[in-house]
């Protein structure tokens, strides 16, 4: 690896598995110090231990990003670890459930919004005062679901549209102060929890039909999304802020 994040103190939420773990691993391999935040304490402890065995400077923190007290406690510990300097925040934690507007209960709607949108707000609010000291990069995890309508995913689509709008607003507020704010809009990514849930629901024919919507001929891989996050987090993207960066094999281009 090239050490593109050498000396950078990074925070990744939802880092215990899936995209979050892939991002944490890649950032660590690029010489970043990694703070891994996840609601599942056992899972993130094991994930951090795995990265440490690889020689990565990784520490696990337990937090529910939708809970202000939980976020405050975790970020207090992270800020202490980093002596007040946070360079990169990746707001990856999220959840997805299925249902049209009629099928989605109010409680489920609230929970999806709390995790996917309020979680970004709370973590950014905790990190920004410390990022202002030296500048930095925030990468929010949106989705192509924030750009197009996906049948049966009302709350998820709404939440990811809100992430894109919040990203652009934050870029307007903070880019002039040296903090770049962007979001990633992945297509379907194989091997994630959401992908496994969809696989359980879909027939082989339905899966093939969905793959056919991707001109590249397949779904994405976690490592490919991690590479895009690395670009936005690193100085290679020094002129990029306010972007909704699609990583979707041209799915939204056709």
Image: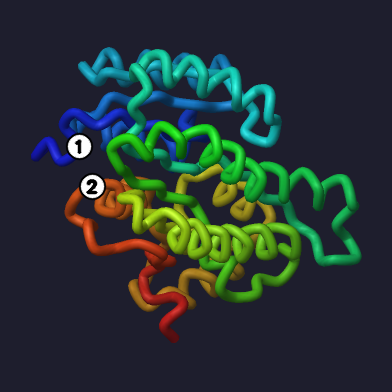
Q: Could you tell me residue 25's position as x and y percent?
A: 30, 32
Q: Secondary structure at mark 1?
A: loop
Vertical placement of residue 176 versus 34, above or below: below
Asked whether the residues under the numbered discs 1 and 2 touch, taking CB atoms below 8 Å apart as contact, a structural biologist would say yes
Q: Give left or right: position of 8 versus 18.
A: left
Q: Give left or right: position of 162 versus 82.
A: right
Vertical placement of residue 211 versus 56, above or below: below
Q: Which residue is mark 1?
A: 5
Vertical placement of residue 18 versus 73, above or below: below
- Mark number for residue 234? 2
Q: Quadrant location of residue 21?
A: top left
Out of 128 and 183, give the one closest to the viewer: 128
Q: Could you tell me residue 199's position as x and y percent?
A: 60, 53
Q: Secondary structure at mark 2?
A: loop
Residue lying at 42% horizontally and 42% vertically, measured from the top left = 90
Quadrant location, the N terminus: top left
For the residue carrying disc 2, how many other residues have a C-alpha within 10 Å: few (<14), some (14-19), or many (20+)? many
For the residue carrying disc 1, how many other residues have a C-alpha within 10 Å: few (<14), some (14-19), or many (20+)? many
Residue lying at 48% horizontally and 28% vertically, measured from the top left = 16
Counting every numbered tag in the picture gives 2
Q: Could you tell me residue 62's position as x and y percent?
A: 56, 19
- For the question of whether residue 186 can be seen, the reply is no
Out of 164 and 150, give the one closest to the viewer: 164
Vertical placement of residue 189 versus 65, above or below: below
As measured in the structure, the alpha-carbon distance from the residue carrying label 1 to the one carrying label 2 is 6 Å
Residue lying at 35% horizontally and 58% vertically, measured from the top left = 176
- Mark number for residue 38? none
Residue lying at 66% horizontally and 64% vertically, measured from the top left = 157
Out of 227 and 82, give the one closest to the viewer: 82
């Amino acid at each position: 690896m090239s050490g593109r994040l050498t000396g950078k103190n990074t925070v990744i939420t939802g880092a215990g598995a899936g995209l979050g773990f892939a991002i944490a691993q890649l950032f660590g391999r690029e010489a970043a110090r990694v703070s891994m935040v996840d609601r599942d304490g056992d899972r993130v402890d094991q994930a951090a231990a795995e990265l440490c065995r690889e020689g990565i400077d990784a520490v696990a923190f337990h937090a529910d990003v939708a809970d202000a007290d939980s976020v405050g406690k975790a970020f207090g510990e992270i800020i202490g670890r980093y002596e007040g300097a946070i360079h990169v925040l990746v707001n990856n934690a999220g959840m997805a459930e299925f249902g049209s507007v009629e099928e989605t209960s109010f409680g489920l709607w609230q929970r999806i919004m709390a995790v996917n949108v309020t979680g970004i707000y709370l973590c950014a609010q905790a990190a920004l005062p410390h990022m202002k000291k030296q500048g930095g990069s925030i990468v929010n995890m949106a989705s192509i679901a924030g750009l197009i309508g996906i049948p049966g995913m009302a709350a998820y689509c709404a939440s990811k549209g809100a992430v894109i709008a919040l990203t652009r607003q934050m870029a307007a507020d903070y880019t002039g102060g040296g903090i770049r704010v962007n979001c990633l809009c992945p297509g379907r990514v194989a091997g994630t929890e959401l992908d496994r849930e969809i696989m359980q629901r879909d027939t082989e024919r339905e899966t093939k039909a969905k793959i056919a919507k991707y001109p590249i001929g397949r779904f994405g891989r976690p490592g490919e999304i991690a590479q895009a996050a690395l670009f936005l987090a690193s100085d290679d993207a020094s002129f990029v802020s306010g972007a909704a960066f699609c990583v979707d094999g041209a799915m939204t281009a056709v």
